[in-house]
Amino acid sequence: MAAKKEGGITAYSVKTKTKNVPMIDPVIDVKSGRYIATGKDAEGNKMAAIMGKAAAEEHIKNGNAKKGSGW
């Protein structure tokens, strides 16, 4: 689940098994009615986080993420 930490999107890193890892350059796509933020962590590992519509729109409005496909 995506969380808001210091204005950015954070997620769980499966590779490093750590929580609340900041996502670098996230892009939020809408797939099957779900809002999915995809990006990379500081080490270059791919990450993804699912969030609600309100959280996705708030991150885009604040400039923390870019709009992807499906909007």
Image: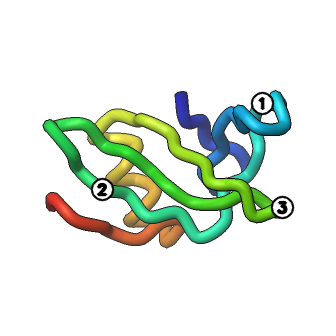
Which residue matches tag 2?
A: 29
* Circle 1 SS class: strand
Which residue matches tag 3?
A: 43
C-alpha gap between disc 1 and disc 2: 22 Å
x, y percent for residue 53: 27, 40
Q: Identify which residue, 8 or 34, lies in the foreground.
A: 34
Above or below: residue 5 compared with residue 14: below
Dot 1 or dot 2, earlier in sequence: 1
Look at label 2 and name its amino acid. Asp
- Residue at 62% x, 54% y: name it: 46
Look at label 1 and name its amino acid. Lys
C-alpha gap between disc 3 and disc 1: 15 Å
* Circle 3 SS class: loop
Q: Nearer the viewer, mark 3 or mark 2?
A: 3
Q: Identify which residue, 59 or 51, lies in the foreground.
A: 51
Left or right of 31 in this view: 12? right
